[in-house]
Image (spheres, rainbow, N blue to C red):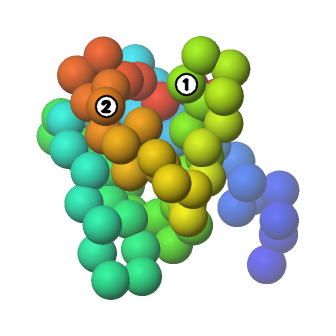
Amino acid sequence: MTTGSNTNNEQQALDVLMGIRLTSVEFVMDYIQLHFEEHTLSALTHPAVDVAGTWYHSGDCRYRDMLCAGLCPFELNA
């Protein structure tokens, strides 16, 4: 197993989502699904959300609100 290869594959998968609009968020038991138009990203680790320089993390009081607030204009940025 080569870490560099896995990292490149993961980055290539994320690159497909760059610039595509987030259309819905699903909280499923112990993971999250982010739907980007025709693509879906399932993540075991909830993403951190940056809103105007303030970071929100899973478990924070307004995390869900901040993640879902920008559904239409939200895009994945590296």
Q: Is residue 5 left or right of residue 31?
A: right
Picture residue at 36% right of the left edge, 43% below the top: 65
- Residue 34 vertical placement versus 21 (above, below): below
Question: What SS does tag 2 mark?
Answer: helix
Residue type at mark 2: give it: Ala
> Which residue has dot 1 on it?
51
Residue 45 x, y percent position in the rendering: 57, 67
Q: Nearer the viewer, residue 52 or 19?
A: 52
Q: What number is the disc on residue 78?
A: none
Residue 5 x, y percent position in the rendering: 75, 58
Residue 78 position by quadrant: top right
Residue 20 in view: no
- Residue 44 vertical placement versus 5 (above, below): below
Picture residue at 79% right of the left edge, 78% below the top: 1
Q: Nearer the viewer, residue 11 or 75?
A: 75
Residue 56 x, y percent position in the rendering: 60, 43
Question: What SS does tag 1 mark?
Answer: strand
> Which residue has dot 2 on it?
69
Q: Determine whether label 2 and label 1 are within 8 Å by CB.
A: yes
